[in-house]
Image (spheres, helix red, strand yellow):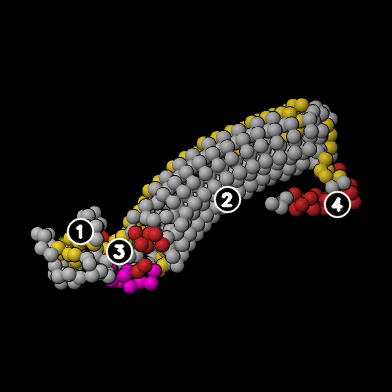
């Protein structure tokens, strides 16, 4: 992923150049002083407001505004020349690349912002605790690559967690998203390998953006917002290989492509009733998933959405499915039956192919849905019975794809133990009525009813309409 710092580098360099040539502006706005070993800049002399000093770009690398060893304790009031000033901002790169910083305690009542890269690349930082009385935003890459960070408490007043804020914080184990958070940036917790528990307390977050938790391979507990969340972005939880149970809340409408790709331990999945779109590959490779119930609002299942769900045995489509895209359920080896709803308009190519031989396929649509090539495996076409509405048997039988099924039967006979007779009679087949009287050899009975077909050593009931 492209580092977003370059955008801010250009802006900062421009500001420094301006300050070099207009020193009065620098003096008026950015008078600098130290208090308790930390550098500060005066941003508003009249209101007596300050921020921690910005980092400085030197020889292609940012140097922190303050070098700190051990613990950093920031309070809301600092002193300069006999006057007290209020701290309301931790500026960009203020403490980045501090190789000896171990703990950060921020107790600043009027904090508004923790800036871009403020604590980036602090390799021995282990704990962060933030307390404020006002709402504040946590900037992009604020704790980027703090590889030993184990605990991070943001307090109750954080409203925004920026892009890449905790990227590659490999030792972070638990995280709590507070109730006021309305924005969670892309890649916010990507590659937090040790993250085990993630709890969303917020009900104001509409979207979890792309790759926000990608590669959190030890994540076991995920509690999503009870309401407010509408979209889960692409790759958001991809490769969360230890996640066993997932419940999508009723507010979610869209699950983007590859959102839960290769969550190999996921054994149970509950989809909320508002989900309309399941994107391409959304649950691809969730090889432990055994049962799936789709909600009433689902309209589209994207390409390869559940491909490779090798343990899937039970599949319950909602009543409003319109499109099952290419390879949506391919390589689902344990899937033996499929019941497709009357709302279905299209089944893509290879949609159920590679899943071995099914026993039964039901399609309740009166008009045969548009069908891609080899929707099902050849074994399924040969061995399974396709059950369709009684008035549509001939339409399905004459369809170039649905007609590949050797047996197509009236849906009303599905649970009766009675099968439809195959379209081609063999000379040696024997047909009897229910009182045991043999019918004319090799000729189908002209009178509708239930009969007994004996073909070689196989005997079964059939329905003639």
The residue positioned 82% from the left and 33% from the top of the image is: 67
Helix, strand or loop at mark 3: strand
Q: Position of residue 166 (x, y in %)?
A: 66, 40
Q: Circle 4 is placed at which residue position?
A: 18
- Quarter residue 128 falls in: top right
Q: Nearer the viewer, mark 2 or mark 1?
A: 1
Residue 456: give x, y in percent of width and height. Answer: 24, 61
- Residue at image location 73% in from the left, 42% down from the top: 117
Residue denoted by label 2: 235
> In whole angstroms, how far apart are the C-alphas of marks 2 and 3?
41 Å
**Of labels 1 and 4, the one closer to you:** 1
Q: Secondary structure at mark 2?
A: loop
Badge 4 local density, few (<14 within 10 Å), some, or many (20+)? few
Mark 3 closeness class: few <14, some 14–19, many ≥20 residues within 10 Å: some
Residue marked by disc 1:
461
Left or right? Give the position of 262 relative to 80: left
Q: Which residues are magenta?
A: 390-401
| Mark 2 and mark 1: Cα distance apart in space | 50 Å
Q: Earlier in the sequence, mark 3 or mark 4?
A: 4
């Amino acid at each position: 992923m492209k580092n977003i710092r370059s955008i801010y580098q250009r802006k900062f360099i421009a500001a420094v150049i301006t300050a070099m040539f207009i020193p009065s502006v620098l003096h008026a706005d950015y008078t600098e002083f130290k208090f308790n070993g930390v550098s500060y800049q005066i941003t508003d002399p009249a209101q007596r407001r300050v921020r921690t000093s910005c980092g400085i770009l030197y020889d292609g690398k940012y140097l922190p505004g303050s070098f700190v060893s051990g613990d950093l304790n920031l309070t809301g009031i600092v002193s300069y020349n006999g006057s007290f000033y209020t701290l309301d901002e931790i500026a960009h790169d203020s403490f980045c690349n501090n190789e000896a910083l171990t703990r950060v305690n921020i107790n600043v009542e009027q904090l508004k912002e923790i800036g871009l890269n403020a604590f980036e690349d602090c390799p021995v930082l282990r704990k962060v605790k933030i307390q404020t009385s006002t709402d504040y935003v946590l900037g992009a890459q604020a704790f980027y690559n703090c590889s030993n960070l184990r605990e991070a408490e943001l307090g109750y007043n954080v409203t925004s967690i920026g892009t890449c804020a905790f990227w590659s914080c490999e030792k972070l184990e638990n995280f709590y998203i507070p109730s006021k958070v309305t924005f969670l940036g892309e890649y916010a917790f990507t590659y937090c390998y040790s993250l085990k528990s993630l709890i969303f307390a917020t009900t104001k977050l509409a979207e979890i953006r792309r790759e926000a938790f990608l590669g959190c391979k030890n994540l076991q507990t995920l509690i999503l917002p009870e309401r407010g969340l509408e979209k889960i972005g692409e790759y958001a939880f991809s490769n969360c290989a230890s996640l066993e149970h997932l419940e999508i809340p009723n507010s979610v409408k869209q699950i983007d492509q590859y959102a839960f790709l290769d969550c190999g331990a996921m054994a149970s999945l509950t989809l909320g009733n508002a989900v309309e779109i399941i994107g391409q590959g959304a649950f691809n490779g969730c090889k432990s998933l055994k049962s799936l119930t789709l909600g009433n609002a689902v309209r589209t299942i994207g390409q390869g959405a559940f491909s490779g769900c090798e343990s899937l045995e039970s599949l319950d489509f909602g009543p409003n499915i319109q499109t099952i895209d290419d390879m949506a359920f391919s390589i689902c080896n344990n899937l033996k039956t499929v019941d497709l709803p009357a709302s279905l308009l299209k089944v893509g190519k290879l949609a159920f192919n590679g899943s071995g031989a099914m026993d039964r396929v039901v399609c309740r649509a009166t008009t045969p849905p548009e069908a891609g090539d080899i929707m099902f495996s050849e074994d399924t076409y040969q061995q399974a019975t396709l059950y369709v509405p009684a008035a549509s048997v001939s339409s399905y039988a004459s369809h170039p794809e649905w007609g590949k099924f050797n047996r197509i039967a009236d849906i009303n006979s599905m649970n009766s133990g009675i099968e439809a007779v195959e379209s081609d009679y063999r000379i040696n087949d024997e047909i009897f009525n229910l009182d045991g009287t043999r019918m004319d050899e090799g000729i189908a009975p002209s009178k509708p009813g239930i009969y007994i077909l004996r073909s070689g050593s196989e005997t079964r009931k059939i329905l003639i309409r």
